Image (cartoon, rainbow, N blue to C red):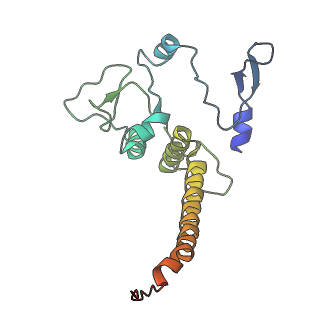
Amino acid sequence: RMKEIASSYDVVDGPNDEGEMFTRPGILVDAFPSPYPNEEAARYANGGALPPDLSVYTTAKHEGLDYIFALLLGYRDPPAGIAVRDGLYYNPYYPGGLIAMPPPLHSDGLVDYEDGTPCTKSQMAKDVVNFLCWASEPAHDERKLMGLKALSACMVGTVIVGVWYRSGWIGYKTRRIDFTKAVM
């Protein structure tokens, strides 16, 4: 399913043999294209605020996953005494409490799950957080598998060197040297 989503995007790649850039269907390791052509368009579409790249935020902060989960679900009515300007929303998990991003998960049932999982705000936030975690490190699983293989190879190599060392030096450790008196 992820390969289908990635291939639906056209990615500029190259240069080819003639030195020209070309487009190709996306693959899983390609960076996600920005929904905005530049920063000014992003600011204009978001009420003057530049949206952060949350894909790197999950690994940049120690509690990045929990923070994004709380941020997605933390929209509340402001408490008494807090004035909220037009275009801002109250979220106690955001620094300062006021955020320009409208609530992205505004109601249950926005997604239909094939396996019958109930579509709640909490489930959708969990899916978004897990996706952002994967997007921040798409090679995570392959890297961990490669590390496990390397560690296993080192352990096997250590055993082989140990057996070789023992068999190579056993003659020196167990030999007996007898000295006889010299006859003069």
Which residue, as the protein is rendered here, is positioned at the far front?
184
- Tell me the residue at 43%/16% (across/down): 47
The relative height of residue 99 versus residue 108 in the rendered view (above or below) is: above
The relative height of residue 31 versus residue 129 in the rendered view (above or below) is: above
Q: Position of residue 180 (x, y in %)?
A: 42, 89
Q: Nearer the viewer, residue 144 or 79?
A: 144
Q: Is residue 156 left or right of residue 95?
A: right
- Tell me the residue at 46%/19% (across/down): 46
Residue 71 visible? The answer is yes
- Tell me the residue at 53%/66% (across/down): 158
Quadrant where the C terminus is found in the figure:
bottom left
The relative height of residue 140 versus residue 42 in the rendered view (above or below) is: below
Which quadrant holds residue 116? bottom right
Which residue, as the protein is rendered here, is positioned at the far top?
40
Q: Is residue 41 left or right of residue 114?
A: left
Q: Position of residue 40 (x, y in %)?
A: 49, 10
Quadrant where the N terminus is found in the figure:
top right
Q: Position of residue 120 (x, y in %)?
A: 52, 50
Which quadrant holds residue 73? top left
Residue 118 visible? The answer is no
Which residue, as the protein is rendered here, is positioned at the far right?
18
Q: Position of residue 163 (x, y in %)?
A: 56, 74
Q: Is residue 134 left or right of residue 9?
A: left
Q: Nearer the viewer, residue 96 or 23?
A: 23
Q: Nearer the viewer, residue 17 or 168?
A: 168
Q: Nearer the viewer, residue 6 or 87?
A: 6
- Tell me the residue at 71%/31% (across/down): 26
